[in-house]
Image (tube, rainbow, N blue to C red):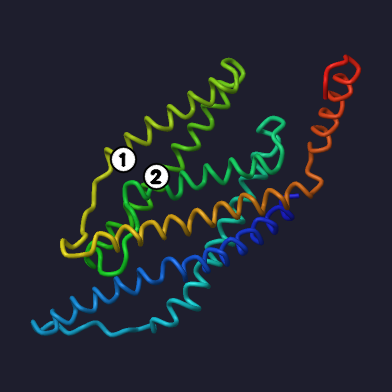
Amino acid sequence: MVGKLLMRGMLAGLIAGLLAFCFARVAGEPQVERAIAFEAHEAHEHAHAGDAPEPEIVSRETQAGVGLLTGVLAYGAAFGGLFALCFAYAWGRAGSMGARPLAAWLALAAFAALVVLPALKYPANPPSVGAAETIGVRTALYFLCMGISVAITLLSIALRQALSRKWGDANATLAGLLAFAIMAAAMLALLPAIDEVPAEFPATLLWQFRVASIGMQAIIWTVIGAAFGVAAERMALPGAARVGRGMTMSKSVLRGSGYPR
């Protein structure tokens, strides 16, 4: 079963990557072009001051075409496969939840942990933003933030599962969300801030680039959750038949008792 789920997850990720590429070409690339033009203008002024401009190793056409497509397809396939493995682990441990609702909740949790929380602390920046000598520190802090976000999400889910039998699903869910909010706020407050945006960089361009970046991720995780949920629902997953029989028996009891179906 896991192998079939893995293939379906990677396929869903490829579909998500293709749609994200189309979105990026329309909504993201214009902002990148404007940021590069700003960077070129700054480099031209520095060249007058005696600093030689850096040579272009990969052409802009390749970056915006084959390079971008390859990157988002690889990203989508990789995270689609990881998503399928997480689904396989969660299946049967989430009560009687069906394949599509479970996939939707997992995709929402992944989007919150891998995208939203890290973006609140270290949002995406276009070219020309950020000092070259701090790129290592910035990358390390971003992945540290992402790892803590994943841990916070898993702890909140585990807390919700532990409290569900004693407090009920609704109260346990509220407790898990409250714990998530408290831990997330603590993480955002404790991690060091990084602000290397040049004062003369257009604020509108920065905002549009970050919105496009979040939009790409939203498309990827929405499509992965929806496409994988449909694909998994069509499989003969262990436990699915049992849930189906339980629903059929419930309907039979309702019909026999005279209650409306």
Closest to the observer, 200 or 134: 200
Instruction: Name the spot of residue 125 as percent of width and height, x first.
Output: 31, 61
Q: Name the residue under label 2.
A: 117
Secondary structure beneath dot 1 equals helix
Q: What's under tag 2, amino acid-wise?
A: Leu
Instruction: Name the spot of residue 50 as percent of width and height, x first.
Output: 9, 84
**Residue under the point 48% across and 59% down:** 216
* Picture quadrant where residue 210 is located: bottom left
Above or below, 97 against 133 in this view is: above
Residue 111 in the figure: left or right of residue 148: right
Which residue occupies the extreme left position in the image? Answer: 49
Q: Which mark is residue 176?
A: none
Q: Name the residue under label 1.
A: 188
Instruction: Name the spot of residue 240 as percent of width and height, x first.
Output: 79, 38
Q: How crowded is mark 2: few (under 14 residues within 10 Å), some or many (20 or more)?
A: many
**Residue under the point 20% across and 78% down:** 41
Asked whether the residues under the numbered discs 2 and 1 touch, taking CB atoms below 8 Å apart as contact, a structural biologist would say: yes
**Residue under the point 71% across and 42% down:** 99
**Residue under the point 43% across and 66% down:** 27
Secondary structure beneath dot 2 equals helix
Q: What's under tag 1, amino acid-wise?
A: Leu
